Image: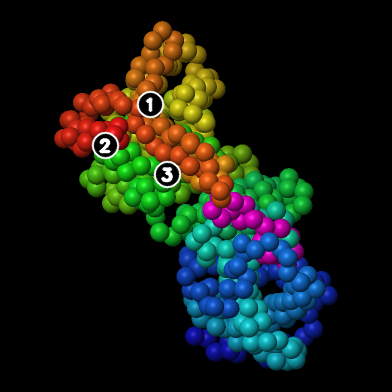
Amino acid sequence: MFGKKSALQEKPAALKPAPSSSGKPAAAKSAPKPGPSASGKPSAKPAAKPKAEADKPVVENKQQSEKYYQTKTTIFNALIDTIDLSQLAQLDPESAAEEIRDIVNEIISIKNLQMSIAEQEALLQDICNDVLGYGPLEPLLARDDIADIMVNGSSRVFIEVNGKIQLTNIRFRDNAQLMNICQRIVSQVGRRVDESSPICDARLPDGSRVNVIAPPLSIDGAALTIRKFKKDKLTMSNLVDFGSISPEGAKVLEIIGGCRINTLISGGTGSGKTTLLNCMTSFIETDERVITCEDAAELQLQQPHVVRLETRPPNLEGQGEVTMRDLVKNCLRMRPERIIVGEVRGPEAFDLLQAMNTGHDGSMGTLHANSPREALQRVESMITMGGYNLPSKTIREMIVGSIDIIIQAARLRDGSRRITHITEVLGTEGDTVITQDLFVYDIDGEDDDGKVLGRHKSTGIARPAFWDRARYYGRHAELAEALDAASE
């Protein structure tokens, strides 16, 4: 580790008064790019716990909070005026954190600040996070029970826990610090966000999805939304434990995933489509070549032969954009056995259907829709929006020939997520697409705590349309057993 003098420009520099600019330029200056992962940051120390208890609404003593932030700003400004960022950037995250902690302790001693040990530890942790990580977001990112983090400007941060949105006591020093952290996040995946390019989609190293919309489009400061991924990847058995699907329904989904049946996962925002898609891909054989296409890479496939592709926005001159449709079309030249599209939202629906219908069995994708019937209508409308001058009947015949199963996910009013339909696409009758439900979720009511009560039940179909495909893969006996057990 560098000695203390190698990271300090001069020892007396710590005695300089804090800049009169309230630290705004210093905050922007203090953004050395973090290393490829945040594992080196001492985020696991107990001192971070008081700030990590973010599920409480903002009801704390405001005067004490303001005093804390004023002290933190003073020390942060002195640190930035003292430390050599170019030297610091050459250290590994652990050494850099130790160097920062040593210097901050010196500054506290020189300025004769009266703080308890717990307050000092919390302050040290916060400043390390500011310089090396994602600032006030670090304790929230460390929690595995949070599904979404929503930052509405520098002073209001919301989280979603157990399907419910809560206001936290987390805040940023100012809008400049928030914007600095947004830029730090998106720069890790080669993207940028500023006044000239104020909207950006990105991802964190763990796959969590990030959206930033910056001023002047966002009036009250940058709006940052993070869809967090759990550290432990969920499996179908976890969904059974949560009550999202019955054991018999999970067995049918396993057979659908293993027998290379073309599947569309439909649902509203936050209904668990991507989680369900991850679970479905776990049934893909390890010797299959799988290619994924996403706007922001978030799928976590565990197979050894996976090629991950990601779209690219245009540059400042409006050049260089790579759309989802470009990726799906290019997939067909890469000898895939399955194509997985993270989200179908435009003309790429046509290319995905063509891929499903030309030997790439078992391809999957998600889209936004509130029912299986609406999902089919959405696919048809997306193809029409692509400018294809095809009759509606032709488009519907293509849909029927390509999509075998629609799995509908829903987020219920109590915040729980359920698979509400497993539906087969059978064919057309005139201009109408014929479907049949294999499993549905019936809501019976709610308990005293407001939890929705219901159960998954089979519709009594003994021989689904993909029976022959299951028999081809030798899994028809398992399918019959699961359907029989569900109908009892």
Tell which residue pokes out farthest to the right in this image: 20
Pick the residue in front: 158 or 437.
437
Residue 487: give x, y in percent of width and height.
30, 32
Asked if residue 464 lies in the magenta stretch, the reply is no
Which quadrant would residue 53 be assigned to in this image?
A: bottom right
Element type at mark 2: helix
Which residue is disc 3 drawn over?
Answer: 244
Residue 300 falls left or right of residue 224: left
Amino acid type of the residue that numbered disc 3 sits on in the rendered structure = Ser
Residue 219 falls left or right of residue 473: right
Which residue is disc 1 drawn over?
Answer: 437
Give the magenta part as a residue range. 156-178
**In this view, the mark in front (2 or 1):** 2
Which residue is disc 2 drawn over?
Answer: 485
Q: How many residues crowd around disc 1 within 10 Å: few (fewer than 14), some, or many (20 or more)?
A: some
Q: Residue at x 67, y 48 (%)?
A: 213
Residue 129, label in figure: none
Amino acid type of the residue that numbered disc 1 sits on in the rendered structure = Asp
**Alpha carbon distance from label 2 to label 1:** 16 Å
Which quadrant would residue 342 be assigned to in this image?
A: top left
Q: How many residues crowd around disc 3 within 10 Å: few (fewer than 14), some, or many (20 or more)?
A: many
Sequence-wise, which precedes: disc 3 or disc 1? 3
Sequence-wise, which precedes: disc 2 or disc 1? 1
Q: Residue at x 52, y 34 (%)?
A: 368
Number of numbered discs overlaid on the protein picture: 3
Q: Residue at x 24, y 47 (%)?
A: 286
- Picture layout, residue 133 above or below residue 451: below
In this orientation, does residue 371 appear?
yes
Amino acid type of the residue that numbered disc 2 sits on in the rendered structure = Ala
Tell which residue pokes out farthest to the front in this image: 448
